[in-house]
Amino acid sequence: MSTPAWSAVLFDIDDVIYPMMQYATSGFKAVSDFIKRVHGVEILADLINAHDRGNPITTIETALRHKFGSLDTRLQAMITYVFACHQPTITMYSDAKSCVALANSLRIRTGIAAGGNPGTQKMKMKALKADQLMDSIIYAGDLAGTNKMTDAITMSCMLLDADPARTIYVANQYSDNLKEIMDIGVKLVIINRENRPVHIDTPFAQGNIPVIDSLLNILDITSEKHDRETCLARTA
């Protein structure tokens, strides 16, 4: 059997392996149930209708100020806690499951290297039963130091016995701090299922970061400089 082009595929979490809007809606329901018990007011529909994919906590605070006229710091702290600590109801994207299965069949290791609050991310992973699918899960927030995301990916490669130069990392958007990931040789890929604008303005990254609309397209990416046109790029 020939050696696969890639030795590992690593994923971020939000809007990569599951839809972030599901998590927001799940949190809105938890907060709405709390507000209904405490104040007897139903706000779930208000939250869902007002949310624009920004910060869910901001959506909640705005809705509560509109409902009650103000929002005291005690209630603000409570709703933040309820949202952050609720057990989410979320499901993995079908293309994420298929991608992991396909990678495994090709002897390509898979893992999670996640940014964000590690406590919250761990609850998402539990809800998705990701530990049953992935070969490794590393939370950058659990690590010390200043380059936590790079360290998380480096550690993932070590655990998976994967060459960084033959490893893909999938994120849902580009940011300048991901340059360090590319500096260690990892191939950065952006997943964009919704045809949203994708801005890759940093000169070193232009033309060198594939943008795909399905995780099933990952294994078609070559390790050479990639033409986004051939990778179903969807940029605005």
Image (spheres, grey):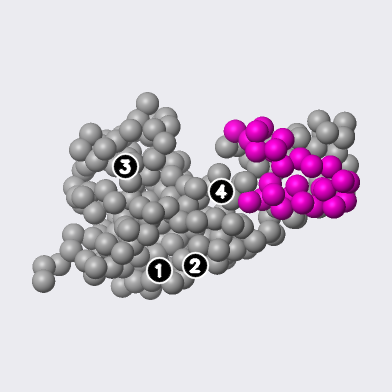
Q: Nearer the viewer, residue 118 or 145?
A: 118
Residue 69 rendering spot, x and y as whole percentages = 87, 31
Q: Earlier in the sequence, mark 3 or mark 2?
A: 2
Q: Amino acid at mark 4?
A: Gln
**Residue behind mark 4:** 22
Local SS, label 4: helix
Rendered view: 63 above or below 84: above
Quarter of the image where the C terminus is located: top left
Q: Nearer the viewer, residue 138 or 64?
A: 64
Q: Earlier in the sequence, mark 3 or mark 1?
A: 1
**Residue behind mark 2:** 129
**Disc 2 and disc 1 in contact, CB within 8 angstroms:** yes
Q: Earlier in the sequence, mark 4 or mark 2?
A: 4
Q: Which residues are magenta?
A: 26-52
Quarter-of-image position of residue 213: top left
Neighbourhood count class around disc 4 (C-alpha, 10 Å): few under 14, some 14–19, many 20 upward: some
The chief SS type of the magenta part is: helix
Q: Nearer the viewer, residue 103 or 184?
A: 103
Residue 26 rendering spot, x and y as whole percentages = 63, 51
Camera-side mark, 1 or 4: 4
**Residue behind mark 3:** 212
Disc sitting over residue 133 in the figure: 1
Cα gap from disc 1 to disc 4, whole angstroms: 20 Å
Neighbourhood count class around disc 2 (C-alpha, 10 Å): few under 14, some 14–19, many 20 upward: few
Residue drawn where x is 49% and y is 67% of the image: 129
**Disc 3 and disc 4 in contact, CB within 8 angstroms:** no
Cα gap from disc 2 to disc 1, whole angstroms: 7 Å
Disc sitting over residue 50 in the figure: none
Residue drawn where x is 45% and y is 60% of the image: 113
Residue drawn where x is 42% and y is 30% of the image: 197
Q: Nearer the viewer, residue 209 or 93?
A: 93
